[in-house]
Amino acid sequence: MGLELGALVEPTAVAVHAVRQSQLKLGDTAAIFGAGPIGLLLLQAVKAAGVSEIFVVEVSEERRQKALELGATHVLTQLIQMR
C-alpha cells in the first residue's frame, strides 16, 4: 500500500465508525458540520449507507462545491438561528 492510500485509512475508519454508531437507516436524513477531509469522507459513508438527504454546513466555497460533487443534496453556509 502506498503512502497516499495509507494516509486515508484512519480518517476513513473514523467516518465509517461514525455511520455505524449513528444507526442510520436507508432513506434517513443526515447533517454533516464541516466539509474538511473527515467531513467529506463521512459524506461518502452516509451516502453509501443509503441516506436520502444529506445536509452539509461549510463556510468555505471550495469545500461546499466539493461536497456537492461528492453527493450532498443541500449545502449551507450557516444554520438559521431559531428563537
Image (cartoon, rainbow, N blue to C red):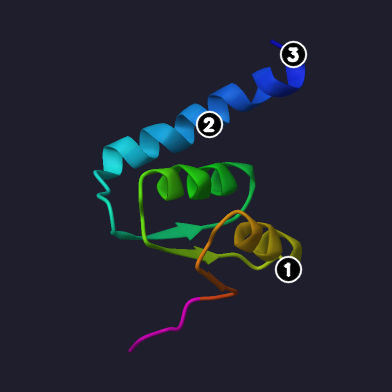
Indicate left or right for 19 with 59 as reference: left
The percent position of residue 43, horizontal first and vertical second, equals: 50, 50
Q: Do the residues under discs 3 and 2 have CB atoms within 8 angstroms? A: no
Say few, some or many: other residues with alpha carbon within 10 Å of mark 1 (under 14 / 14 to 19 / 20 or more): few
Q: Amino acid at mark 1?
A: Glu
3D distance between C-alphas at marks 1 and 2: 23 Å
Q: Which label belongs to residue 17?
A: none
Residue to which mark 3 is pinned: 2
Point out the stretch of residues depicted in magenta: 79-83
Quadrant of residue 83 in the image?
bottom left
Element at badge 3?
Answer: loop
Indicate left or right for 27 with 74 as reference: left
- Where does the N terminus fall, quadrant-wise? top right
Q: Amino acid at mark 2?
A: Thr
Element at badge 1?
Answer: helix
The residue nearer to you, when weighing 25 against 81, is: 25
Q: Main secondary structure of the magenta part?
A: loop
Dot 1 or dot 3: first in sequence order is 3
Q: Which label belongs to residue 61?
A: 1
Q: Do the residues under discs 1 and 2 have CB atoms within 8 angstroms? A: no
Dot 1 or dot 2: first in sequence order is 2
3D distance between C-alphas at marks 3 and 2: 16 Å
Dot 3 or dot 2: first in sequence order is 3
The percent position of residue 38, horizontal first and vertical second, equals: 57, 42
Residue at the image point whose x is 45% and y is 83% from the top: 80
Seen in the picture, residue 81 relative to 13 is either above or below; the reply is below
Residue at the image point whose x is 73% and y is 68% from the top: 61
Residue to which mark 2 is pinned: 12
3D distance between C-alphas at marks 1 and 3: 31 Å
Residue at the image point whose x is 65% and y is 58% from the top: 69
Say few, some or many: other residues with alpha carbon within 10 Å of mark 2 (under 14 / 14 to 19 / 20 or more): some
